[in-house]
Amino acid sequence: MAIPTDSDFWEDLLIFIEEGKVIPVIGESIVTFGDDDSNLYQWLAKRLAEKLQVPPGQLSENPTLNDVVCRHLLNGGARNVIYTRLHRVLRDECPTPGTTLRELASISAFNLFLTTTFDPLLENALNAERYGGQALTQRLSFFPEAADKDLPARKIELSRATVYHLLGCVSPSPEYVVWEEDALEFVCALHQHLPGMEKLARDLKEHGLLILGLNFSDWLVRFFLRITKQSRLSESRSNTEVLAVGSAGTVPESMVLFFGGVSRNIQVVAADPAEFVAELASRWREKHPPAEGTPSEFVLPPELEMPKGAIFLSYAREDEDAARRLKAGLERHGCTVWYDRDRLKPGGNWHNHLQDEVKGRCSLFLSVISRTTEGAPSGYFHQERNWASERQAMFSEGEEYYIPVVIDDSPLSTQREPRTFRRVQATRLASGEVTEDFGKYLHALQQKRLSALDQ
């Protein structure tokens, strides 16, 4: 079957992706490397056979990792060396991501990727496409004995691109899936532990899955989907919840018949996954063209702990887009800016943590003022600003610490800010766009404060 040509199919899929309703699930068929977009796992199988000294005559021309492992074990080889050898190959020889992975990474609406593979190439592709090569993609992985298996936040709250390895991530220990026995054990363990992984479980249940190149056997795919969707696959639903894409040779006829006849909410497309990704990325770029003449920008994700002397950014959740623009604009002028993206996450000592940042570590307090903050009689940003008011009392007369910024058409004379700051002159930066003068001013002010802190 060829790539779908129905324009409605693609338009519907793009709308779901734009609205954040789709999570891509990556299989080994689309993990590619090099200029010729070669498949990583075919290459890994041959490299592993060489490392394990499996005679070429005992394998087919293009063996799978499962073929190599089975032959190695039949020859009396030790099991643990399988994982150490693969770890060394990827550590020492890890190739650069191919076109398919980079095309997928370029679809900016995807912020959470699930993968059934153990390699780091998807993370590397995201770092290259989104973060200028800096290693800022968040990597998480499932392992039955791991202490913390859940996502750190729900999909909608993730502050950076996140890759979750459902079947483990490469390491010197057997903590990831290489062959079919591993897959069986991990999928059973995932079934056991998923109810306790509240954030991941809810995201899997509430989002559609776009499965790309999953090279599992027929029964294992059904079992995997039953676990992730957490209900009978034959239950009637109004929308397509799973779109599975695989080459004709890798999609058994029994699977197509099962999903086509029993599960109307699961659609199987028998097409080359790499070609499907290329078409999807092309249509995404057509609908969301990058701005010409300007380099692509990215916002550095927040540090887990504020660097001493950073500018603390206080904002209402409704104003987050403007806050991100403020952060990016100030960083372009050399400022160190920090805000806690997960400030509203329950649990832990985040309240005391934020209080310490405002009253002890930050050099300047930037208050984002808007119709939201001026209209809300309560909100956590008011608590932050009251802490700032207490901190202001420690500075001498005329020493600047509190920097009010109005991002919309609200009056420059504020009504909801603490009385201490009512007379401080606010600056209007529409939608959080930092002007040249303001950026230079804040950078100079921060450097002055940092010098004072060092003395």
Image (cartoon, rainbow, N blue to C red):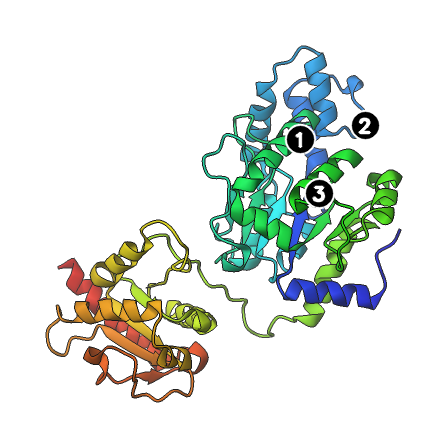
For the point 71% across and 43% down, the residue is: 225
The answer to which of 306 and 414 lies nearer the viewer is 414
Q: Is residue 16 above or below residue 254?
A: below
Residue 225: assigned label: 3
Q: Is residue 217 visible?
A: no
Q: Is residue 288 above or below residue 36?
A: below
Judged from the image, the secondary structure of the residue bearing numbered disc 3 is helix
Hey, what amino acid is under mark 2? Glu
The answer to which of 89 and 122 lies nearer the viewer is 122
Within 10 Å of the Cα at label 3, are there few (<14), some (14-19), or many (20+) other Cα atoms?
some
Within 10 Å of the Cα at label 2, are there few (<14), some (14-19), or many (20+) other Cα atoms?
few
Residue 239: assigned label: none
How far apart marks 2 and 1 lie (CA) works out to 24 Å
Residue 183: assigned label: 1
Judged from the image, the secondary structure of the residue bearing numbered disc 2 is loop
The answer to which of 159 and 450 lies nearer the viewer is 159
Hey, what amino acid is under mark 1? Ala
Within 10 Å of the Cα at label 1, are there few (<14), some (14-19), or many (20+) other Cα atoms?
some
Nearer the camera: disc 2 or disc 1: 1
Q: Residue 55: x percent and y percent?
A: 74, 17
Q: Which residue is mark 2?
A: 61
Labels 3 and 2 touching (C-beta < 8 A): no
Nearer the camera: disc 3 or disc 1: 3
The tag earlier along the polypeptide, 3 or 1, is: 1
The tag earlier along the polypeptide, 3 or 2, is: 2
The tag earlier along the polypeptide, 2 or 1, is: 2
How far apart marks 3 and 1 lie (CA) works out to 14 Å
